[in-house]
Amino acid sequence: MDFADFSDVPVVDGHIHFPHPDLVGDLIAVMDGTGVARANLVSVPDPAQINQNPALIHFKSLHAQRAYISGALDYTATLAEAEGAARALAGQIRTLRAIGFDGLKLVEGKPTVRRTLGLPFDGNAYAPMWAALEELGFPVVFHVADPEEFWDPERCPDWAAAHGWFYGDGGFPSKEGLYAEVDAVLKRHPGLRIVFAHFYFLSADLGRASDFLDTHPEIYLDLTPGVEMYLNFARDVDATRDFFIRYADRIIYGTDIGAGATVDGPRRGIAWDESAGRAWVVRSFLETGEPFSAPVGVGHWLGMDAEGFHGIALPRDVLAQIYHLNVERLFGSDPAALNAEAAIAELDRLAALVDSREGESVDGPARQVAGRLKAEA
């Protein structure tokens, strides 16, 4: 995988997972090796540590100009049905912004997470949060649904089922049900600025994707694979290329690098082969005009119809929008400055929550990052 052959247009990766502070070296090596100038690092809820926000604070404190950070919510009060829990979610948006987070990451639309939380997006629990996000213009990276084949017992891949991502047994929300909840939210809050991850899982229906973007002018789609996305795109290369040129200002480059360490645990690390493979596939799709195959490092992709990948050879001005201009328009030309005092207060709060739950002092990421920031203050 030679990244020197790709365009020299600056690249901002709009969707990288960074689950643990110990992975800084791994991520910097991947960013440098794949030519990524900046990344939007995303956090998700984490049962062991409330969420992964401490890792993002840690990275930004070390590499302020290389990272936008999109934080996750803390559901401790919400799941305990504490009074005022809905207002607490809205308050967290203001806290994240005050710390220096650049946006919010929601994985709550993935069917496994949606079932666990049991909170409809258009329900009362989230209503004040959506209002706060719209008022502040605070961007959201939102994972909603999954590939349609995950609901189909005949088509669900074995690797997805092994992760618990087969949804056709009646115990999960339907894909269309999730979309209906999102439609209701967007109707109430047309000013929301949302990047729907994984192309909103509409890669098999570009007509529907076009209607969605036309209806919601503040909405973006990102290119984080889902390998099915790139197989779908290859079925009609000309139509796909036309779509990308028409909506060049609404599409954001992203790779989902670090997703494996999020799903399987940080000990897996942010591996070069897998990470570079993801980036190479997305960039080959955008920049070449030829068929290509999945590289060895991307694991389960190899068992699929990898010969079905095909590039769409976008012009340089379109690449510039997808690679960096759209992210900069949405999140700012430079990442927000980190407010160390506000960050320490939130890290101390998260550490105390973990201690309370475990019944003892836990030397987890929140306490470790808070300690370092205090020592440097």
Image (cartoon, rainbow, N blue to C red):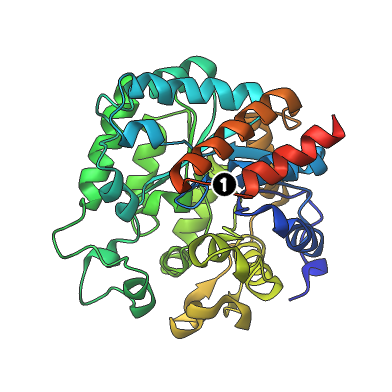
Q: Position of residue 276 (x, y in %)?
A: 69, 69
Quarter assignment of residue 210 = top left
Secondary element type, mark 1: loop
Res. 14 visible in picture: no
324 sits to left or right of 212:
right
Q: Position of residue 11 (x, y in %)?
A: 74, 50
Judge by depth and name the residue closer to the eye, 348 or 3.
348
The residue lying at 34 percent from left, 39 percent from top is 211
The kind of residue tagged 1 is Gln
254 sits to left or right of 89:
right
Quadrant holding the N terminus = bottom right
Which residue is the extreme one toward the front?
Answer: 360
Res. 114 visible in picture: yes
120 vs 156: above or below? above
Q: Position of residue 315 (x, y in %)?
A: 68, 52
Callout count: 1
Judge by depth and name the residue closer to the eye, 294 or 249.
294
282 sits to left or right of 302:
right
- 10 Å neighbourhood of mark 1: few (<14), some, or many (≥20)? many
The residue lying at 63 percent from left, 72 percent from top is 274
330 vs 169: above or below? above
Quadrant holding the C terminus = top right
243 sits to left or right of 324:
left
- Would you name the residue on which mark 1 appears? 52
Which residue is the extreme one toward the top?
Answer: 135
Judge by depth and name the residue closer to the eye, 104 or 190.
104
Which residue is the extreme one toward the left?
Answer: 170
Q: Position of residue 371 (x, y in %)?
A: 75, 39
Quarter assignment of residue 25 = bottom right
